[in-house]
Amino acid sequence: MEQSYILETRALGHRFTDGAAVLNDICLQVPERSVYGFLGANGAGKTTTLRLVLGLLEKQQGEILLFGQPFGRNRLQALQRIGAMIESPSLYGHLTATENLLVLQKIYGCPKERIALVLEMVGLSATGSKKAARFSLGMKQRLSIAMALLHEPSLLILDEPTNGLDPNGMIEVRELLLSLNRKHGITIVISSHLLGEIEKMVSHVGIIHSGSLLFQGTLAELQQQRSAGGRLSLYTDDQSKTTSVLRAMNIQATFDGGKFTMPMPQQEMIAALAKELIGSGVSLYELSPAGNDLEAIFMDMITH
Ligand SMILES: Nc1ncnc2c1ncn2[C@@H]1O[C@H](COP(=O)(O)OP(=O)(O)OP(=O)(O)O)[C@@H](O)[C@H]1O
């Protein structure tokens, strides 16, 4: 059975006036109830893609499908089901959290009760008469997310919501998004230029570089892709004895920065290597995958 996507783009392309193409053939596939991390360095094309998806930029090339329907035809119905935060949050600094939400509630015409509900969802119920201008950046981000949630969207599109946050603020936003996804079943598309910031919350990843999608799949698939070409790192107390053991076992390794690295051997070979080293009186400090974290995968993909 063909998988259905809550958001799909087909061969999406874009070029700003007089400029070179900034998006080429972007085919995003965002499964329902996923947390989709849209990753790319500054200028890769994330914001442009998301603006096109939200109809904030006029589509030039390709197709956009939202909730299984072509975007152009069902624009308003689709937008009513999407909450978005593109670039920095725009809040009224002289108003409280509730007052900021009241402004939007009147525009959307949604029930007033939603205000207390979304404040609860983002953990801002207790901010009372405090004006938004006096909120921390993390609180401002959460208020913006509350605003995006007011009309009960089933898809949330957030452009770099952790930008500029300190580690605590990032954890706050991450936990909030995870609970929105798990408890309320909201599909989330979140863009970031830092994989480390979002890898703990995403189920799917799309990596964009210079306007082209380099990878798309589950987080596990991304990790597998890396392990296939992975390396093993070895750190011992005795370089010369270790070199002899490696030679005797016919393992090609390089020595750099106090550690040996080698192409990832089969599991049995790793066990045999550990046994041989210990048997030769070598102290084994570390035997682990090298450069296998997601940040390394990401850097590897965008530099090759
Ligand atoms: N209004 C515009 N006019 C001309 N070029 C633009 C415009 N907006 C973006 N660009 C260019 O399009 C490319 C993609 O920009 P975009 O903002 O989509 O990247 P991004 O991945 O969101 O990066 P960032 O993380 O810096 O926001 C960049 O080269 C950018 O300079």
Image (spheres, helix red, strand yellow):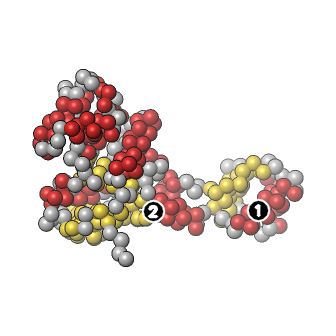
Amino acid type at circle 1 is Ala
Q: Residue 205: image x %, image y %? A: 41, 59
User: Residue 98 is drawn in which quadrant?
Assistant: top left
Amino acid type at circle 2 is Thr
Label located before the other in sequence (2 or 1): 2
Q: Residue 180: image x %, image y %? A: 36, 47
> Which class describes the residues within 10 Å of circle 2: few (<14), some (14-19), or many (20+)?
some
Residue shown at 64%/57% (left/top)?
289
Residue shown at 81%/49% (left/top)?
283
Q: Which residue is mark 2?
A: 218
Label drawn at residue 73: none
Q: Which residue is mark 1?
A: 271
Taking the image as shown, residue 1 lies to the left or right of residue 86, namely: right
Residue shown at 27%/58% (left/top)?
49
Q: Residue 137: image x %, image y %? A: 33, 33
User: Which residue of the protein is positioned furthest toward the top in this rendering?
Assistant: 129
Disc 2 versus disc 1: distance between alpha carbons? Answer: 30 Å
Q: Which image quarter holds the N terminus?
A: bottom left
